[in-house]
Image (cartoon, grey):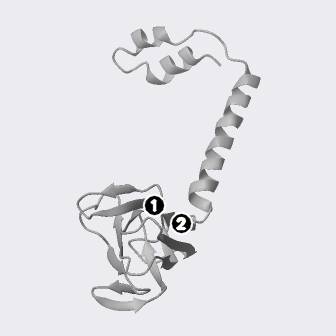
Amino acid sequence: MNLRAITLKYMGWCPGMKNAAQFIPNREIPNERLKQVSTLGGLIFLSYLVYNVVAPPRSYAWDLGFENAKYDDIYKMYVREAVGGFGGIYSFKMWAETPENTTILVQIYAVENKNYPRALYTYRNDMFYYGGKPVGKHYEGEWEFNDHYVWRVYSESKEAVFYVRLNFLRFNLRLPHGPR
């Protein structure tokens, strides 16, 4: 197989293609070499399909400690972040271990919507609050996530630890967020 001959055969009608074809080597590629390259390309494509299309989205388990966290001067708290890519419906659990009277703030937002968080939680005295109302010591629920999300967690204490568990349950088969 000669790449220059094939290029000129199918693209020779295009203005300037004869000049551009001068840069393509004018030699025969052995059929065995062509089979090897095609097989390798097919395997790479197949592995991409398995990883990104067939395999379910990942589940996450984050334990965010604040020993080496950055200090945020605006909130006057230590801050940690965790990022994940999601696609479907997840069971969502979070809890914290903190010294007494320590406040933790949790912001969940899509990567491109930093100024519009999906949820804001506060944790104080062994209780999570959402919209000022208590929701429990451990928050559990099912959420639909279809994007890359960031969990930004602020803590007043370096001894606090915040835990998040996100387990993939199923795809949402309704439009617009169902499988592609």
Q: Is 113 placed above or below 169 here? A: above
Q: Position of residue 154 (x, y in %)?
A: 36, 67
Q: Position of residue 144 (x, y in %)?
A: 44, 76
Q: CA distance from mark 2 to mark 1?
A: 7 Å
Residue 9 vs residue 129, the one in the foreground: 129
Q: Quadrant of the N terminus?
A: top right
Tell whether 12 sits left or right of 91: left
The residue indicated by pointer 2 is 62
Label 2 vs 1, first from the N-terminus:
2
At a point 46% along the width and 13% down the height, the residue shown is 21
Q: Label 1: few (<14), some or many (≥20) within 10 Å?
A: some
Q: Quadrant of residue 115?
A: bottom left
Q: Are marks 2 and 1 in contact (CB under 8 Å)?
A: yes
SS at mark 1 in the image? strand
Q: Label 2: few (<14), some or many (≥20) within 10 Å?
A: some
At a point 56% along the width and 10% down the height, the residue shown is 25
The residue indicated by pointer 1 is 82
Q: Is 139 placed above or below 55 here? A: below
Q: Quadrant of residue 63?
A: bottom right
Tell whether 173 sits left or right of 118: right
